Image (cartoon, grey):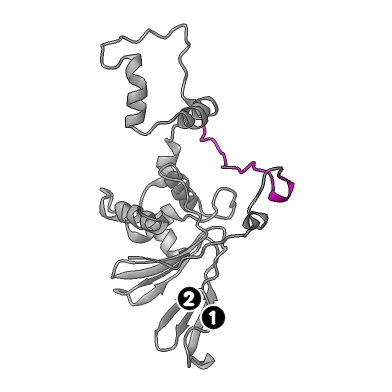
Amino acid sequence: MMGTTGNFDAALELLTKASSCDRSLPEAMMMMIPEAWQSNATMPESKNAMYQYNACMMEPWDGPAMVAFTNGKTVGASLDRNGLRPSRYYITTDDHVMLSSEVGVIEGLVEADVATKHRLEPGKMFFVDFDQGRVISDQEIKATVSGSRPYGDWVQHMVHFQNVRGTSLNDAKPAKNNGAMMPTDMPRRLNLYGFTTETMEMLLVPMGLEYKEALGSMGNDAPLAVLSEQPKLPNEYFKQLFAQVRFVCVL
């Protein structure tokens, strides 16, 4: 079974390798890990339109994570818009570039040899182009990508679900039963395509009624061990807070 990192890598490869619109690696990363754009009044219109258009393609991947990526010709890193993972970079006077989640990973590096040092801010991208031999700023790379397609025109022609003219039930014509699927076939068809009762009732029905995906959580309503009337094991009286950290490099 593929993990979260593998799924992210596969999705990124699909966006770059199987795209008919010649999508670049940084453009695909901006689609998967966008910055916070919805309420940013200072963001250029072209970049805002790019994020708005891409939001129709997929939901943002919020990690939390700092993801490094490369295709052999360029290398970069993106921090998710929540910025919950530390990431700092150094650029030395002899054109060495170092980025890490910690400070001080390079032994013997003296301050006099450091030309630039900074942290990767939430939603920002650090990008190096080997062919051009330079570090491209977050502002420049995103301005280039957002200006490469007419995102503003595309957004103007977007059709929102709530604006689609509905059809009255009184005007609806009964569907013709051509024998392709009988009601008795429904459970088998639903199982074939992975639909469950939970999917139908908690996901599809709210989408049809409220025009948006439903939000939910898998709660644990079991009483605390100290309050339970049932016998409990000693370990059940303790709880552990868990925060998983992965070092991800997408190739």
Residue 4 among magenta residues:
no
Foreground of the two, 47 or 240: 240
Q: Quadrant of the C terminus?
A: bottom left
Residue 55 spot, x, y in % from top left: 46, 45
Residue 91 spot, x, y in % from top left: 46, 82
Q: Which mark is residue 103?
A: 1
**Which residue lies under the disc numbered 2?**
100
Q: Residue at x 56, y 38 (%)?
A: 215
* Total numbered circles: 2
State the SS at label 1. loop
**Residue at the far right in the pictured view:** 227
The answer to whether residue 110 is above or below residue 53 is: below
Residue 230 spot, x, y in % from top left: 67, 43
Give the class, few, some or many, for how many residues have Cα within 10 Å of label 2's Cα (few <14, many ≥20). some
Disc 2 marks a residue whose amino acid type is Ser
In three-dimensional space, the C-alpha distance between marks 1 and 2, rounded to whole angstroms, equals 7 Å
User: Which residues lie in the magenta part?
Assistant: 212-228
